[in-house]
Amino acid sequence: MIQDLREGPEAGQIDDRARFDIIRYANCWEDSRLLIEALEPGPGHRVLSIASAGDNSLDILSTGAEVVAVDLSLPQLAALELRVAAFRHLDYDDLLGFLGVHEDPRRRTIYGDLRADLSETSREFWDHHRDSVDAGIIFDGKFEHYFRTFRERVLPLVHNQDRIDALLQEKTEAERRAFYDETWNSKRWRLLFNVFFSRRVMGWLGRDPEFFRYVEGPVSQEILRRAERALKVLSTHDNPYLTFILRGNFDGALPPYLVPEKYEAIREHLDGLTLCRGTVEDAARHFGDDGFSGYNLSDIFEYMDEDTARACFEALTDAARPGARLAYWNMMVPRQGAAILPERLTYLRELSEELHTKDRAFFYGAFHVDERSP
């Protein structure tokens, strides 16, 4: 069941400007390992989490914490609700096959068995997107289509499959650095990367153009710098986000919520998950009586002006327990809650910076952890 918390749109909000009638993200392109370390969720904890495709909310749920997953987009909530039904009724191998990690010709039949668990809005959505179910639901987001275009149309102009496979082989950091500098980092790589990951092309094929409203300066050059660091410093062979971009599937490098040891824990705690449609402010006001001990806020402040961000942080801290932590990413727009509300929030700089150095979703510029003052 998806609860609708909206009380009417507010002028100028992102939901008035960007499209939320499609699945934008068929996967969460954020490393939930950071969230687990930052929020330290567990039994007795209550976490408000941006739903997106559901990966990160389910990973938090695996710790035994109660999770309220919120999103403005009904298709994104439908993506999470179908995952919940799949976890509830399928064994581990069938779960991976149904989602798309493995081949499984029975997906439409399995969906027919799962759809009774879905809310009316999610059933209606998936009934009209059965081709997406047939293909595997981890593939049919706008962002995934964007990376598919990169993988199939752009990357072959730069590197052949043998070189891509070599990039993803296990190496020491010294070997990764040498491979990048001597083999991967050609002029053609830099040229085509800067074109394909420009603000214009990303807005057209990947993210909604409105998500760049508050971005200043060149986008592609900064993302290239981050990609270079990831390919040199972070291990490449077990990076699910890099593997999906380059190979089109997780191919042995599973995102955290799909690793075998999380399967039973997620199934055990599914009744602790609440799905709702609205803003995080709506959810904080509606469910805030008992207070939240943690917040997974994705990169929502990227899309807000400073006044809107302040109002959002105020609503979240109003519903926060003393010592509650807020975790969120910045991609291109610097937003930090402790700088906006220093009387309520403390920036955990050392923890934030340490976690950001381990972030396998390498395109983000910063990861922030703020703590609610007592």
Image (cartoon, grey):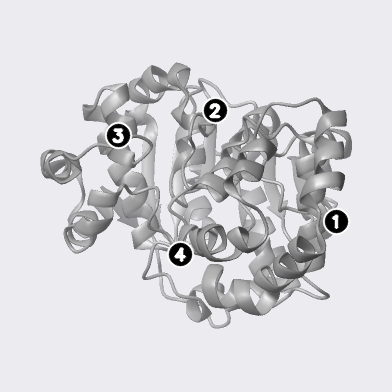
Q: Label 3 amino acid?
A: Gly
Instruction: Say if mark 1 contacts mark 2, CB within 8 Å.
Output: no
Q: Residue at x 72, y 39 (%)?
A: 359
Secondary structure beneath dot 2 equals loop
Secondary structure beneath dot 1 equals helix
Q: Residue at x 38, y 60 (%)?
A: 5
**Residue marked by disc 1:** 339
Q: Label 1 amino acid?
A: Ala
Pick whichever of labels 1 and 2 is earlier in the sequence: 2
- Are there few (<14), some (14-19), or many (20+) residues within 10 Å of tag 3? some
**Disc 2 vs disc 3: which is toward the camera?**
3
Q: Give how far apart the Cα atoms at labels 1 and 3 are.
A: 45 Å
Which of the labelled discs sits on residue 51, or is there none?
Answer: none
**Residue marked by disc 4:** 142
Instruction: Say if mark 4 contacts mark 3, CB within 8 Å.
Output: no
**Residue marked by disc 2:** 45
Q: Give how far apart the Cα atoms at labels 1 and 2 are.
A: 26 Å
Q: Give how far apart the Cα atoms at labels 4 and 3 are.
A: 21 Å
- Are there few (<14), some (14-19), or many (20+) residues within 10 Å of tag 4? some
Q: Nearer the viewer, residue 231 or 124?
A: 231
**Residue marked by disc 3:** 97
The quarter of the picture where residue 277 lies is bottom left
Q: State the image coordinates of residue 362 (x, y, percent, origin top left).
A: 71, 47
Pick whichever of labels 1 and 4 is earlier in the sequence: 4
Pick whichever of labels 1 and 3 is earlier in the sequence: 3
Q: Which quadrant is the C terminus positioned in?
A: top right
